[in-house]
Image (tube, grey):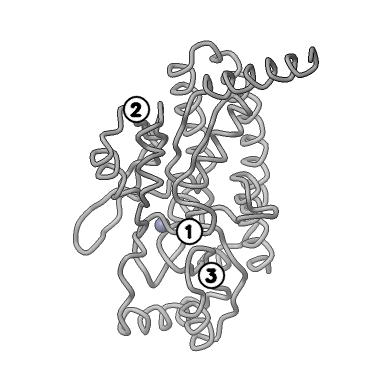
Amino acid sequence: MRTLIALLTLSFALLAHAEDKLKVVTSFSILADITQQIAGDKLEVRNLVGADADAHVYQPSAEDAKAVFAADLIIANGLGFEPWLARLMASSEAPGTRIDASAGVLPLMLDEDGEKVPDPHAWQNLANAEIYVQNIAKALGQADPQNAAHYNAGRDAYLAQIRSLLVEARAGLGLLPPTQRNIVTSHDAFAYLGQAYGLKFVAPQGLSTADEPSAAEVAALIRQIRAEGIKAVFVENIRDPRLIQQIANEAGAKVGGTLYSDALASEGSASTYLGMFKHNLDTLLAALKP
Ligand code: ZN
């Protein structure tokens, strides 16, 4: 009997503990991982757009609306990456606070159908990831002051890991000769990576993945690959690889592997943000080194 009471007390205590945890919704897999790396087990994190999934064309479910309604804090990327999120929050009358992890990032502007829009893929530059980490840790500390010191410690440990990968990225990519710095991917997701490390990315598809490229755009890209002597093109984990394979065949280039653009892998080394970045770095170097 005494054991039973002890067990009951323990399970009530655990239950109460779970109830107390800050409820956080993240909009996509990269933010879910960054948040978890900072916070450890102090949070209950529910993520919306999962591994290998495409946030540009995401359609929220009824379950997502419930999760957003129940959340204390909603962490989004911002810069136009989640065009569906404001509507989801409004329709579910979500009382929680939304923050944009990219706040304070200097956005690159891109031309999308004749209109200048911010490029949302800021996480592809590790220096921007540091800003994401600062913003998320600050928001967690404000929403859950009791655990602020824990979040700050998690932030500092994680920032140290980001900085060491940044040193590795600069050293590796810095060695590539100028002729090996042009890269083709499925959609315009890597401009921040290109800007930070001196690479030039081109893609048959623009900023968002919503529109399919025209035959004329594909033909122009094939001519560009031939003219610039681009050696390798890369498929993306969130996209059907067939178009890129076709472009590679017709242009006489090889497919250099898979790059993770807008989502993590569901398992393996690219299932964390830093693992994903390292995978992309190693894949690029393996294909581009002379
Ligand atoms: Zn994208």
Q: Residue type at mark 3: give it.
A: Val
Observer-nearest of 108 and 213: 213
Pointers 1 and 2 in contact (CB under 8 A)?
no
The C terminus: image quadrant: bottom right
Q: Residue lying furthest front in this view? A: 1
Callout 3: SS = strand
For marks 3 and 2 on the same chain, the one whose residue lies earlier in the sequence: 2
Q: Residue at x 55, y 69 (%)?
A: 234
Pointers 1 and 3 in contact (CB under 8 A)?
no
Residue 182 x, y percent position in the rendering: 51, 66
**Mark 2 — residue?**
96
Callout 1: SS = loop
Identify the mark at residue 53; answer none if there is no mark.
1
The crowd level at tag 1 (other Cα within 10 Å; few <14, some 14-19, many 20+) is many
**Mark 3 — residue?**
235
Q: Quadrant of ligand 1?
A: bottom left
Residue 70 x, y percent position in the rendering: 39, 32
For marks 1 and 3 on the same chain, the one whose residue lies earlier in the sequence: 1
Observer-nearest of 264 and 63: 63
The crowd level at tag 3 (other Cα within 10 Å; few <14, some 14-19, many 20+) is many
Q: Residue lying furthest left in this view? A: 114
Q: Is residue 44 above or below residue 256?
A: above
Residue 108 x, y percent position in the rendering: 35, 47
Q: Residue at x 36, y 52 (%)?
A: 60
Q: Residue at x 69, y 65 (%)?
A: 286
